[in-house]
Image (spheres, rainbow, N blue to C red):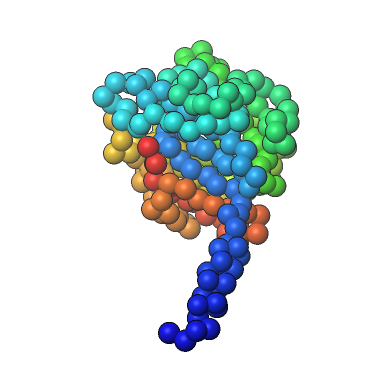
């Protein structure tokens, strides 16, 4: 090896290390309706963490052992309110209205978990938040078809770059109903959640029922997706993640 390489190679390697900074918003799907959003500067928001032992053998997603700054809970069911395994003394949001927490603007919008005005399964909070200039909406266990007024209320928090939508039906909207809600909310990226996977045997539909006949479906074959405003897909896309837990 020529002597120059001894100087040039380490400089090149160090240089490459510097030109690849970790950038953008990191989105990780743990399973069910639980996601981690980690901002470019390290602020962590977790949505709807499940209780890993909330349904016995039927629910095999492992405990979420991350820390968080903020947790959102859409409603008080065991697959959405398992806040106790999460460290970091997070602020836990179970509320409606708009607030800014650690530079993240968050709005909670009331909806129903069923088509009977919430009398069967209670209320559900839809959380819309802006992180790293990306507008995100997490529908929780939306179980009613939102009326035009409700759609406008949600749309006011958009236009959405990313929508987390429950597609497994049974406890939430049927796939075709959810498709119509998605069409009205018109996000750039839809990430399906709350459906049957190999890790759980609750009576939900698999994601395929929702994907049938849809265009622009991307299966990431990973649990984590990194995104910035600049790298948002130009066309609308349905992005299927694998659960990490
Ligand atoms: Zn649920």
Image coordinates of residue 171 in percent, x first then y, are 42, 26
* x 41%, y 51%: residue: 222
In the displayed structure image, the side of residue 161 where residue 241 appears, left or right: left
Image coordinates of residue 114 in percent, x first then y, are 49, 22
Image coordinates of residue 44 in percent, x first then y, are 58, 36
* x 73%, y 28%: residue: 99
State the residue lying farthest toward the bottom.
Answer: 2
Q: Nearer the viewer, residue 173 or 65?
A: 65
Q: Establish if 222 lies above or below 158.
A: below
Quarter of the image with the N terminus in it: bottom left
User: Would you say residue 99 is visible in this rendering?
Assistant: yes
User: Would you say residue 152 is visible in this rendering?
Assistant: no
* x 50%, y 77%: residue: 6
Res 60 → quadrant: top left
* x 39%, y 29%: residue: 63
Q: Establish if 109 lies above or below 241.
A: above
State the residue lying farthest toward the left.
Answer: 57
Q: Establish if 173 lies above or below 118.
A: below
Image coordinates of residue 191 in percent, x first then y, are 50, 45
Quarter of the image with the C terminus in it: top left
């Amino acid at each position: 090896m020529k002597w120059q390489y001894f100087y040039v190679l380490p400089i090149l390697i160090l240089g490459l290390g510097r030109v690849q900074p970790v950038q953008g918003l990191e989105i990780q799907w743990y399973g069910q309706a639980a996601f981690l959003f980690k901002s470019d500067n390290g602020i962590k928001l977790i949505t709807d963490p499940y209780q890993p032992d909330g349904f016995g053998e039927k629910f095999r997603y492992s405990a979420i052992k991350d820390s968080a700054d903020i947790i959102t809970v859409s409603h008080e069911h065991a697959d959405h309110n398992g806040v106790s395994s999460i460290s970091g003394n997070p602020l836990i949001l179970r509320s409606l209205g708009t607030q800014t927490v650690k530079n993240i603007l968050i709005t909670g919008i009331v909806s129903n978990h069923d088509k009977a005005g919430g009398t069967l399964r209670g209320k559900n909070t839809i959380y819309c938040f802006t992180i790293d200039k990306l507008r995100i909406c997490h529908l929780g266990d939306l179980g009613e078809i939102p009326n035009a007024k409700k759609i406008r209320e949600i749309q006011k928090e958009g236009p959405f770059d990313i929508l987390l939508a429950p597609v497994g039906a049974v406890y939430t909207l049927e796939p075709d109903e959810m498709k119509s809600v998605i069409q009205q909310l018109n996000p750039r990226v839809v990430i399906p959640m709350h459906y049957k996977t190999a890790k759980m045997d609750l009576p939900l539909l698999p994601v395929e029922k929702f994907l049938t006949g849809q265009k622009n479906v991307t299966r990431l074959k990973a649990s984590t997706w990194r995104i910035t405003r600049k790298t948002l897909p130009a066309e609308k896309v349905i992005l299927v993640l694998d659960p990490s837990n």
